[in-house]
Amino acid sequence: MKKMKGKPPDFIIFFITLVLVGLGLVMVFSASAYTAGELRGDGYFFLKRQAYWAFFGLIAMVFLANYDYRKLKKYTKLALIINFVLLALVYVPGIGVKLSGASRWIGIMGYTIQPSEFTKLALILFAAAFLSRENVNVKKFWIGVVPLLAVMGASFLLILKQPDLGTAIAIAGTVMVILFVAGMEGKHFFLLGITGLPLLGYLALAEEYRRRRFLAFLDPWEDPLDTGYHIIQSLYALGPGRLFGVGLGRSRQKFFYLPEPHSDFVFAMIGEELGFIGGVTVIFLFFLLIWRGFKLALMAPDMFGSLLASGIVSMIAIQVVINIGVVTGSIPVTGINLPFISAGGSSLFFMLSSIGVLLNISKYSQY
């Protein structure tokens, strides 16, 4: 492996990440202090847990920022094996943890880990390594595309069974972006589109609870106390925020009105407490991070680095769009975290780890 001379990592990406993590800690505490005190007996419960994962996530970020990203290629097969083992363990009694009818977590020493968060990084690594091989031609559908889709499809089905359609869609979307960057033929995109979109529509309506969520998206007031409740309460949070918000810590919706105000709907808390200005600022920070990340992908020194950076940035972008779309009532409700801000240890840890890889690529970029 040819040694490349590095330079300091991208400061803009590093700084924005720290700002988003810091904002996340503040908003998680603000949104959860009351409910944590009532339900857990400790108002700092979710803050302490988020800070714990942020600490180890930042350590992982610093380590990976100083670990040559090209060496990650040799861990591709191991990452895939770990991925499928973890996804299978959620169904093992005594190991898998089932909450609200979903089997998405593994319980280890009193902590829960969500394997699908690791799946995102593992599949990005596999896709980048596979498509950057000299003997792989992405323009040849059966040789360059199908093997990647098969691995992605197996993970997709295991996550769908949990059930977690939102995360499965985010992973599929990320892989499609990587294929696009790698140069997949337009006719192959069209082929996947005409087969994938009807399948997506079927999956969205196949289960009763998903059909009800879709109908609630069309008209939440048809069932305001059940399927439309999340959307209505989220809009009730965003509305009073107006331009500057009601003030940090002064939200009313967090008092057992809006479900999951510190996790999936934390952006609604930002809108209520920090107003339109706060919400737009967060969106701008994500936009700047994504723009900087794609610029980095264009300037990466090799195909592997370019695809790896593209996958990481697109994963962040897709989650931001889905989360904010749900909170604002623009798309049907699905459980996707807002990167770096929503409460969720697994998501925060692996997001920060991904940023570490991105920072390492930036050390060898050409801009």
Image (cartoon, rainbow, N blue to C red):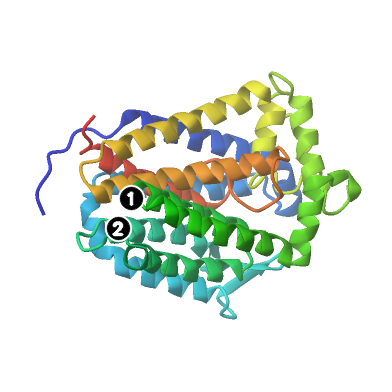
Disc 1 is placed on an element classified as helix
Q: Name the residue type under label 1.
A: Ala
Q: Is residue 162 above or below residue 174?
A: below
Residue 101, horizontal then vertical, whole percent: 71, 68
Furthest toward the top, the residue is 243
Residue 142, horizontal then vertical, whole percent: 36, 68
Q: Residue at x 30, y 37 (%)?
A: 298
With 67 as the anchor, is 60 left or right in this view? right
Q: Badge 2 local density, few (<14 within 10 Å), some, or many (20+)?
A: many
In this orientation, which residue lies closer to the viewer: 334 or 188?
A: 188
Within the image, what quadrant is residue 104 found in?
Answer: bottom right
Residue 352, horizontal then vertical, whole percent: 41, 46
Q: Is residue 114 visible?
A: yes
Residue designated by label 2: 131
Q: Is residue 343 above or below residue 293?
A: below
Within the image, what quadrant is residue 158 found in?
Answer: bottom right
With 283 as the anchor, is 326 left or right in this view? right
Q: Quadrant of the N terminus?
A: bottom left
In this orientation, which residue lies closer to the viewer: 248 or 347?
A: 347
Residue 211, horizontal then vertical, whole percent: 77, 60
Q: Are marks 2 and 1 in contact (CB under 8 Å)?
A: yes
Furthest toward the left, the residue is 2
Q: Is residue 164 visible?
A: no
With 39 as the anchor, is 164 left or right in this view? left
The disc label shown at residue 182, or none: 1
Measured Cα–Cα span from mark 2 to mark 1: 7 Å
Furthest toward the bottom, the residue is 93
Disc 2 is placed on an element classified as helix
Q: Quadrant of the C terminus?
A: top left
